[in-house]
């Protein structure tokens, strides 16, 4: 199970840190990712991290502003979001894939097997 938290309402230029807590004992065997979705649109890729945290991948729209990380000892993944913009407003979902090879990151919805419940991020101008 994945449990996302940390969403909220901020003004443009502000910051938030999302967390994704995973249950189970094999967290380091899963590639992880963050996606977001607004009503009426498809879920879109935000960031991904490989199994040991040494490789990351970002959507062009969030590069430089967002940082994905993970703590395998705590079974938790994070998304630090800085310089937030109104267009970042969405429900953010964390995801995990059990098919991950060590070095790879994954950016497609279809790559992922497990999803958290989502956490709302609202950025006002």
Image (cartoon, rainbow, N blue to C red):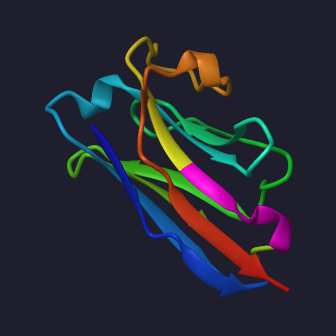
Instruction: Decide which of 117, 22 is in the foreground and name it.
Output: 117
Residue 114, image x and y in percent? 40, 27
Residue 63, image x and y in percent? 78, 54
125 w.r.t. 16: above or below: below
Instruction: Decide which of 100, 91 is in the foreground and name it.
Output: 91
Instruction: Decide which of 30, 124 is in the foreground and name it.
Output: 124
Quadrant where the N terminus sits is top left
Classify residue 125 as left or right of residue 54.
right
Picture residue at 48% right of the left edge, 44% below the top: 94
Task: Answer whether residue 87 is magenta in the image.
Answer: yes
Magenta residue span: 86-92
Instruction: Decide which of 46, 121 is in the foreground and name it.
Output: 121
Picture residue at 66% right of the left edge, 48% below the top: 36
Classify residue 121 as left or right of residue 29.
right
Quadrant where the C terminus sits is bottom right
Q: Is residue 82 visible?
A: no
Residue 30, image x and y in percent? 37, 26
Picture residue at 57% right of the left edge, 64% below the top: 120
The count of marks equals 0
Q: Is residue 61 visible?
A: yes
Residue 107, image x and y in percent? 67, 28
Picture residue at 44% right of the left edge, 20% below the top: 113
């Amino acid at each position: 199970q994945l449990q996302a938290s940390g969403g909220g309402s901020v003004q443009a230029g502000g910051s938030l840190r999302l967390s994704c807590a995973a249950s189970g004992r094999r967290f380091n065997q899963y590639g992880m990712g963050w996606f977001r979705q607004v009503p009426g649109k498809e879920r879109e890729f935000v960031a991904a991290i490989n199994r040991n945290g040494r490789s990351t991948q970002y959507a062009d729209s969030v590069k430089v502003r967002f940082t994905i990380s993970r703590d395998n000892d705590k079974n938790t993944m994070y998304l630090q979001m800085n310089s937030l913009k109104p267009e970042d407003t969405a429900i953010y979902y964390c995801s995990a894939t059990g098919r991950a090879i060590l070095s790879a990151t994954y950016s497609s919805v279809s790559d992922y097997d497990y999803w958290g419940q989502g956490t709302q991020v609202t950025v006002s101008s």
